[in-house]
Amino acid sequence: QNRMLQVRTVGFNQTMWKNARYGAVNFMGQYQYAERSPWYWAAGVAGGKGTHDSTIYFNVRYTLPGGMPSF
């Protein structure tokens, strides 16, 4: 049971190359910081009153050329 859970995140999405005939390549990144505080922490358990985590994601995406199909 979490008393408090907070997540902060920031990211970017940059088009590295784009061509109408061949598609596009995007480079994306995201940083996430999470904090957690439980309602109860067992005596003698390491960690104190809560915990935190930092996570970094990177992604390279290729987008196929063309557009949405017409119906």
Image (spheres, rainbow, N blue to C red):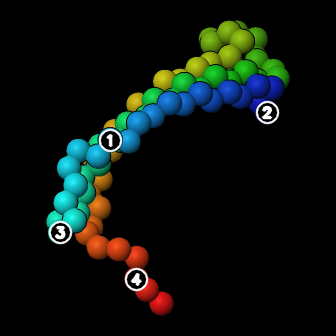
Question: What residue is disc 1 on?
Answer: 14
65 relative to 40, above or below: below
User: Which is more toward the observer, 33 or 20?
Assistant: 20
Give the residue drawn at x 68%, y 27%.
Answer: 6
Contact between marks 1 and 3 (CB within 8 A): the answer is: no
Question: What residue is disc 3 on?
Answer: 21
User: Which is more toward the observer, 16 or 2?
Assistant: 16
Quote the CA–CA distance across marks 2 and 4. Answer: 47 Å
Left or right of 37, for residue 58: left
Task: Tell me the mark number nearer the camera, choosing from 1 and 2.
Answer: 1
Contact between marks 2 and 3 (CB within 8 A): the answer is: no
Task: Tell me the mark number nearer the camera, choosing from 1 and 3.
Answer: 3
Secondary element at image label 2 = loop
Question: What residue is disc 2 on?
Answer: 1
The answer to whether one can see residue 27 in this image is yes
Secondary element at image label 4 = loop
